[in-house]
């Protein structure tokens, strides 16, 4: 038996296991990496402490003004650090790997979470005893009764509440119709970084001061709304500049003490740069990188956005500085790569911390989505790839780190070189880049009101979503809907086994009395539509509550429409904006396969009676393996099987029809999305046995992927099922996340690269939104689970991000192992 062909990542790991030292070529970034690699992150409480101190002092003032003052207080007092060897500075917390707290989100369960977080399975953190005491005694008590989560739980109608939380304990999610607004201040977001690079915060402050001077002192609107907004913008601009200058002073102090001449020169240059940016426009590539980094990190201190603040189209807004410096001999390719790696390493040290048990379960493996977007098209519709595009791809191939999250835009006219290098990067095996399809995204943005220039210039944000800086205005996190729970409620007349005799769903009748498929289908659809109804009720409440709890002065300062309308970005309506929200279809493949099995085996072929099916399901197939095998071999979504795909398309259509009718009432686009993060695991833990052969409380299918192991006809069939299940006549569509796992052997060599590039072109032609790959041998995953200490550096693709395999829970590890490994392409 020949040895399996290994991906480059697997080869590196095997070399490490054999005792070889596998080092990156740049010593500086290697040195930084080894200061924190494979260490558990710790919680830094300074942001929470200073934010709370300020809020105690500013009660009664407008919320936006309070937020800006809190950020300035943080900027004045938080410890600033400059790591050894680093060329880019600015941290939101302590040295090493760290996470920070947002008590305005987590205050009602902050004390309990701090006690549990070091020992939890999903993404544990360390915290000192003194810091724990400060949180429990000083920070958490202030926020009790003031958090959005508490207000939401009190405001939701009783009927909606029971789908959302345990009515007896609102800290416990039901994982049925799940809100996501209480563990993040905003959904994914991208700032207009180019505004900072070209104008600087001094110019933004000057603009706000001029507008403030022009307000009518006799106008109540100007006095009560516009003046506080502009004052907040002025304060936040001062705050970030103050923070940058503190880093300049620290760099000068460290330079004075340094005995290393080379490092001393680096520190003095850092000091010079920090006094220049982000206050003033950037003059060169290093200043542009530092200005962007300051903006990104200060924004992380300001808000807990879902999926972290993304980086936008870095190859576009940084390219003029790179091109200029390269031509002038100021910088080399190696210099630029080193600066990128310094940024990636600093990103890797900031770990997004979810205290909420629900948020932690949604985002396993220290999830992160600080997407860097490359490729795509220019605002006038031309191909946008440039030399910086290729340099960023090269960095991902050369530097063994799962930061940043890299997103490559693909369109029908992409250059052959770009597609080749994307394919070669995918073959590395660490899950980068994920692909987003202009041929699907751009027309949908146009249909929702964007101009051509805005649509062509979108940036990838979060797992697989996109943003148009200065046009997108919707920040309210949205509902995740567990539709396999609707299948279970159809089987048990509105009940779920986990919740006993509680009548949660509709009483749609005893399925043993259903004589025809149409009766079962209508019962399921009643549960399905009822879930949607309560998701929209949730969102109505969320939209109207959030502006009372969250403000975002920095994000508003960087948004043209906010500055024009004098409104915070969290305002329910901002004139001229496009409000793109969503609702999540959880367990798409699980639902499709379950309904297909019932329709085919019970009502058409009559190989099973509904009673036989119910008995097998109620016993979790123990003693009913023959029945389970029948169900497992029924038509399955993901195989280009028209039987299953037709059901999938009808489910898709029913969702689209509902939101077409009712999202207008909310004044937003609530589009259908299939992007689960890692939530298909905890959602599966509340759903008992399903008729597709899935065992009780195991993971659901993820995204628009097939059920685990069900896609047996090859990866092209997976694409065709995705295509066949979409209703292209509706604009109420959003991202569909698609995972494909390939063996390294099937794309080995130049022939393999060509096949992978052709597969990507097929995906692009089919106008599917998203595609990402795991290129790894199943044996590697099994070995890593068995001997984790040997595989600490194994990176795998999860759901819109990559993570170390050994950082995942056993359930999620098993889920990845169970996905079909396609051996031909």
Image (cartoon, helix red, strand yellow):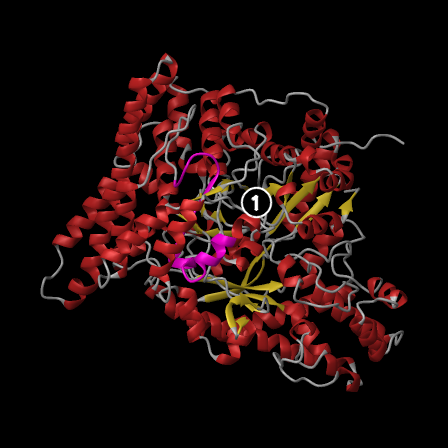
Q: Position of residue 23 (x, y in %)?
A: 59, 22
Task: Check the image and report above or below for 449 versus 388.
Answer: below
Q: Nearer the viewer, residue 35 or 670?
A: 35
Q: Could you say whether the residue bearing mark 1 is in a helix, strand or loop?
A: loop
Q: Is residue 126 magenta?
A: no
Q: In the rendered image of this protein, does residue 569 appear above or below residue 296?
A: below
Q: Residue at x 46, y 29 (%)?
A: 342
**In the figure, 61 relative to 530: above or below?**
above
At x 74%, y 85%, the residue is 510
Nearer to me, 167 or 493: 167
Query: Which of the 4 image quadrants contains residue 761?
Result: top right
At which x and y percent is residue 34? 53, 27
Q: Quadrant of the C terminus?
A: top right
Q: Position of residue 767 (x, y in %)?
A: 61, 53
Q: Is residue 115 above or below residue 333?
A: below
| Of 789 and 322, the residue lying toward us | 789
Give the quarter of the image for residue 792: top right
Q: On the image, numbered disc 1 is attached to which residue? A: 411
Q: Dot 1 surroundings within 10 Å: few (below 14), some, or many (20 or more)? A: many
Q: Say if residue 412 shows up in the picture.
A: no
Q: Position of residue 492 (x, y in %)?
A: 71, 79
The N terminus lies in quadrant: top right
Task: Left or right? Give the position of 646 relative to 182.
Answer: right
| Extreme-left residue of the structure | 218
Q: Which residues are magenta?
A: 92-115
């Amino acid at each position: 038996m020949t040895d399996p062909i290994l991906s480059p990542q697997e080869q590196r790991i095997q070399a490490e296991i054999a005792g070889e030292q596998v080092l990156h070529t740049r010593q500086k970034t290697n040195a930084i990496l080894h200061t924190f690699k494979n260490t558990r992150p710790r919680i830094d409480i300074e942001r929470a402490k200073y934010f709370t101190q300020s809020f105690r002092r500013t009660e009664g003032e407008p919320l936006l003004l309070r937020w800006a003052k809190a950020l300035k207080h943080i900027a004045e007092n938080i410890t600033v650090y400059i790591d050894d060897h680093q060329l880019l500075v600015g941290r939101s917390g302590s040295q090493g790997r760290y996470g920070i707290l947002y008590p305005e989100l987590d205050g009602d369960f902050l004390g309990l979470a701090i006690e549990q977080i070091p020992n939890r399975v999903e993404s544990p953190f360390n915290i000192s005893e003194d810091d724990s005491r400060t949180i429990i005694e000083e920070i958490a008590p202030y926020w009790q009764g003031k958090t959005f989560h508490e207000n939401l739980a009190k405001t939701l109608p009783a009927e909606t509440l029971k789908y959302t939380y345990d009515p007896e304990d609102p800290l416990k999610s039901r994982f049925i119709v799940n809100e996501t607004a209480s563990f993040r201040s905003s959904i994914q977001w991208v700032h207009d970084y180019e505004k900072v690079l070209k104008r600087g915060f001094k110019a933004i402050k000057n603009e706000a001061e001029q507008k403030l001077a022009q307000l009518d002192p006799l106008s109540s609107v100007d006095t009560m709304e516009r003046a506080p907004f502009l004052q907040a913008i002025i304060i936040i601009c001062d705050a970030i500049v103050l923070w940058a200058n503190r880093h300049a002073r620290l760099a000068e102090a460290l330079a004075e003490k340094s005995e290393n001449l080379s490092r001393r020169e680096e520190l003095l240059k850092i000091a010079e740069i920090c006094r220049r940016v982000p206050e003033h426009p950037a003059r060169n590539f290093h200043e542009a990188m530092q200005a962007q980094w300051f903006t990104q990190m200060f924004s992380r201190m300001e808000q807990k956005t879902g999926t972290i603040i993304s980086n936008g189209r870095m190859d576009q807004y940084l390219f003029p500085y790179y091109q200029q410096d390269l031509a002038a001999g100021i910088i080399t390719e190696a210099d630029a790569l080193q600066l990128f790696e310094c940024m990636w390493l600093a990103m890797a040290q900031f770990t997004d911390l979810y205290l909420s048990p629900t948020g932690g379960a949604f985002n396993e493996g220290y999830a992160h989505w600080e997407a860097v977007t490359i490729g795509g098209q220019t605002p006038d519709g031309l191909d946008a790839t440039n030399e910086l595009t290729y340099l960023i791809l090269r960095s991902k191939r050369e530097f063994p780190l799962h930061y940043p999250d890299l997103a490559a835009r693909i369109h029908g006219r992409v250059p052959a070189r770009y597609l080749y290098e994307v394919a070669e990067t995918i073959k590395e095996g660490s899950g980068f880049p994920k692909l987003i399809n202009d041929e699907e995204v751009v027309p949908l943005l146009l249909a929702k009101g964007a101009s051509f220039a805005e649509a062509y210039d979108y940036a990838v944000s979060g797992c697989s979503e996109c943003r148009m800086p200065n046009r997108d205005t919707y920040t309210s996190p949205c509902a995740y809907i567990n539709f396999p729970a609707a299948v279970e409620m159809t089987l048990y007349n509105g009940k779920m086994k986990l919740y006993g005799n509680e009548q949660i769903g509709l009483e749609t009748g005893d399925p043993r009395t259903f004589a025809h498929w149409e009766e079962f289908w209508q019962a399921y659809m009643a549960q399905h539509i009822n879930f949607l109804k309560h998701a929209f009720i949730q969102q109505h409440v969320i939209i109207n509550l959030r502006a009372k709890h969250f403000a975002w002065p920095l994000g508003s300062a960087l948004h043209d429409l906010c500055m024009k309308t004098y409104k915070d970005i969290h305002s329910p309506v901002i004139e001229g904006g496009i409000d793109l929200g969503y609702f999540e279809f959880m367990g798409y493949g699980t639902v499709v396969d379950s309904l297909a099995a019932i329709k085919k085996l019970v009502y058409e072929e009559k190989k099973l009676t509904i009673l036989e099916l119910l008995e097998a399901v109620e016993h979790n197939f123990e003693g009913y393996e023959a029945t389970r095998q029948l169900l497992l071999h029924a038509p399955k979504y993901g195989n280009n099987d028209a039987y299953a795909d037709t059901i999938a398309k009808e489910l898709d259509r029913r969702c689209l029809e509902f939101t077409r009718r009712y999202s207008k009432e909310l004044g937003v686009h609530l589009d259908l999305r299939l992007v689960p993060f890692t939530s298909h695991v905890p959602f599966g833990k509340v759903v008992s046995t399903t008729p597709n052969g899935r065992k009780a409380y195991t993971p659901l299918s993820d995204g628009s992927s097939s059920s685990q192991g069900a896609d047996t006809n090859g990866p092209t069939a997976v694409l065709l099922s995705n295509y066949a299940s979409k209703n292209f006549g509706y604009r109420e569509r959003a991202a569909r996340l698609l995972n494909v796992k390939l063996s390294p052997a099937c794309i080995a060599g130049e022939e393999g690269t060509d096949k992978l590039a052709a597969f990507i072109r097929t995906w692009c032609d089919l106008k599917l939104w998203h595609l990402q790959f795991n290129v790894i041998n199943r044996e590697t995953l099994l070995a890593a689970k068995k001997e984790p200490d040997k595989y600490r550096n194994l990176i795998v693709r999860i759901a819109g991000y990559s993570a170390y395999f050994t950082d995942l829970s056993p359930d999620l590890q098993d889920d990845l192992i169970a996905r079909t490994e396609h051996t031909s392409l």
